[in-house]
Amino acid sequence: MLLRPTDRGLFCEAGNFYVDPWQPVDRAVITHAHGDHARWGSRSYLGSREGERVMRTRLGEQAHIRCVDFGEVVTLDGVRVSLHPAGHILGSAQVRIEHQGEVCVVSGDYKTEPDDTCSAFEPVRCHTFVTESTFGLPIFRWDPQHEVMAEVRDWWAGNRDAGRSSILFAYALGKAQRVLSALRGADIGPIVTHGAVERLTRDYRDSGVAMPDTIYAGAEPRGRDWKGALIVAPPSAAGSPWLRRFGASSTAFASGWMRIRGARRRRSLDRGFVLSDHVDWPALLAAIDATGAECVWVTHGYREPVVRWLRDTGREARSVASQWEGEDDASELDATELSAEDAAAQP
Amino acid sequence: MKRFAALFSAIDSTTRTNEKVLAMADYFRDADPHDAAWAVHVLSGERPKRLVPARRLAAWAIEEAGIPEWLFEEGYHAVGDLAETISLVLPPARRESDMPLHHWIEDRLLALAGQSDDVQRQAVGEAWQELSGVERFLWNKLITGGFRVGVSRLLVIRALSKMSGIDDATLTHRLTGHWHPDAAAFSALVAADTADADVSRPYPFFLAYALEHELESLGNAGEWQVEWKWDGIRAQLLHRRGQRFLWSRGEESVADRFPELADAAALLPPGTALDGEILPWVDERPLPFAELQRRIGRTKLTPKILREVPVVLLAYDILELDARDLRADPLSERRRALESVLRFSGDVPLRISPIIPAADWGAVRSAHGRARDMLAEGLMLKRRDSAYGVGRRKGAWWKWKVAPHTVDAVMIYAQAGHGRRASLHTDYTFAVWQDGQLVPFAKAYSGLTDVEIRALDSWIRKNTTEKFGPVRSVKPEQVFELAFEGIQRSPRHKSGIAVRFPRILRWRTDKPAAEADSLETLHGLLEKFG
Ligand SMILES: [Zn+2]
Ligand SMILES: [Zn+2]
């Protein structure tokens, strides 16, 4: 077997590298810049060129990162490694590993519905497919992005008419920019960002992704009237004093978890928009099928149900633990959130 | 249905009471009266009789979704609500319709009654194909009969009042008793003419708040009427135009359950309404509440049970006399009227709840100390000049309960809650020691703060020893102080006892499990109070 789960993450012995290790190692191949995949402190990293900007923001300007184009093959100790778009966030990649005729693909996080902020997911044929399972239950099924974004615009318009501001919580890396991108050209605004969102949005712009104009909240004078504004902030800002400046407001969260009524009500949100950067149940099964894999490793989420389903439908499957789950996987771990205000961009 | 679904979403998407009321008032104003009638009905917590068991509904959904049962269960654990899980696993709707709410309830839902399994299955399957999102969720909620949306009857009434301009009390009165949801009923409900009174309708019960401060803060003891707080079933007995009615506080007609009281109502002057407590009564003393429960539990009232558990109505108050509404009169005058009406002797099962003579607060305190001996739950304090109000209002009536029994118990099982608390563990099973073993004896849901619930939830997740379905066995380490009102023998429980109204008083993080109470302690309480 090409890969082996270890207490630092998935290890490729033949190539002497780890994929998304959660502790410092010599050689790390990174699927994408989210905090649960790109950890700080390894000697060297291999990642996609598309994600270079955001990886640097996450791993530090000093980090030793080798960037490759999608599809470009790198040989590590005789093992052929290439990255292929995962459609999750800017630069997100699946890692294809080939050695002596055996092919293994690690999906990282992925979604198959295309959006304008990153390269669209590409299925890659393999013998072993390591898949995420964040939303690996049949209760999770997404509506197309344009329908969800129409709901967001209606919500914003209703708030504007009622003299309120609209505060939309979205993960600072990926979801926030996807929402912003989808609002380009919409009759909406002004669009205001929290520091954590602003900084990464700038990275997206620098990477050539089209973003609408945004106003960084921290650069605006106190006491400004925010009626009719759309504020995009990380979920960690919910309930914080930072929100007070926006006056009367309606709050919403854009996340796949909003599919569940209880998850929305527990957060005392006014609205939940079901918008996810992960595959839903039908897309997960379709993606697995498309790889033609004989063996599926399931990690990161609802591992056990997905493994059981795959076995019951005649496939070989096993569950692979990662450090970033357990029972409390109800939050897509995102390190920017932990230091949201520290990361605030300087105007 | 789309309009009603929009109302539901509006209510569900705000935590502000005022916005909920406004959303409902808007709906009542615009909606077809027939739809509005049903909306009043279901929003105020009434529900159509459950026509399909939830489990069967789930089985059908599993078939439609083409998934195995275990996978459905996994979804249910994540969602925490059966009707919602069903609506989420079903394939998307194929042909959406927009029929009015009353059509869905009367022609689609109620039409399921008495149908064969196959016909019901077919009809429900068709409904699922026409409904999506929130509408499908609501349909499932209506079928399974558990419709909790975070509004109370009180808020519905406030919305109706806002929309119609009619005061809360009149609306409450009009909604009490038999109310069939149709267009005519809704129009009558919000009709400007308030000189109506359905013969059968009881008055809304006036309720007391728990005493919060020292007795002395209530002023002069002489201004208060002091009575026992009896532990029975609060009820109104009516005699109007030759008809007799007995209503419990849940606004359920209980005349069939207590025929002797319904019969005795005929002895009252026509146009009379009494408020009192139904008590099992032998030798001028109440029997324990468990006896009354035993009688209620019987599907058939045999002469034997009628003989073993005779009941009386111990009247607290008179609300109507000679067809005149007395509720605005001071209590002292109502009491005189009550005494003039209830002058029966011998076998008539209608009594007056006695006034406890209490010249000063010291006497009230000593009466409170005797409450358990009287098999009473405590004392009632009512201002002598008080009107009989609507619902619960602070200041005029207080209840002063005797302290509950308490015991320290160990949590052994936990289960996820529902609705707002789905996927948090909020339902707990507690045990006490017996011969080095923990014996479960009570389940409790309430009493912890949200912060404590979250902390306990994460402890539970990390200390689960076994899972069976939604229930987790946890390490027996956490001790809680539980309070309960009554205790009785129960062969159905492993512990041999059952407690009434158990609730959590405190999380005893200071106490190791080994120091929790034993079953012996509970048996001791049983000897004394059971
Ligand atoms: Zn990710
Ligand atoms: Zn992830």
Image (spheres, coloured by chain):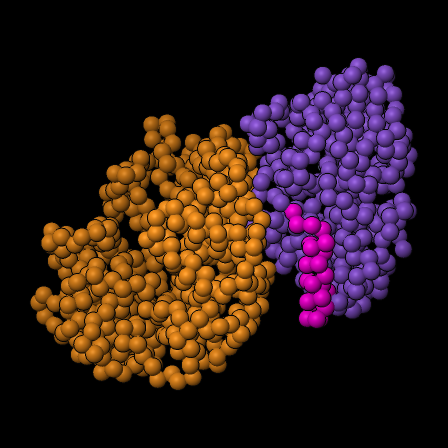
Chain colours: A purple, B orange
Position of residue B527 measured from the top left corner of the image (x, y, whole percent): 23, 42
Task: Give residue A326's position: percent from left, percent from top.
Answer: 62, 34
Relative side of B474 to A218, left or right: left
Tell me if B343 is positioned left or right of A17 in this view: left
The foreground one among B75 and B96 is B96
Question: Compared to A76, does B210 lie above or below?
Answer: below
Residue A327 locus on image (x, y percent): 59, 36
Q: Would residue A318 appear left or right of A112 to someone viewing this image?
A: left
- Residue in view at x 46 percent, y 61 percent: B104
Magenta segment boundaries in residue numbering:
A142-166
Q: Nearer the viewer, residue A120 or A307?
A: A120
From this viewpoint, which residue is outermost toward the left? B346
Tell me where residue B205 sits by quadrant. Answer: bottom left
Seen at 82% across and 26% down, the residue is A28
Q: Position of residue B179 (x, y in %)?
A: 35, 69
Q: Which residue is more in the foreground, A12 or A83?
A: A83
Quarter holding residue A87: top right
Q: Residue B409 occupies which quadrant of the picture?
A: top left
Secondary structure mostly seen in magenta is helix
Above or below — where is B259 with respect to B317?
above
- Is A156 one of the magenta-colored residues? yes
Q: How many callouts does the rendering have?
A: 0
Taking the spot 52% from the left edge, 38% from the top edge, the residue there is B66
Is residue B122 covered in magenta?
Answer: no
Residue B509 visible (yes or no)? no
Inspect this view and state whether residue A111 appears.
Answer: yes
Q: Is residue B27 above or below residue B420?
A: below
Residue positioned 88% across, 24% down in the render: A74
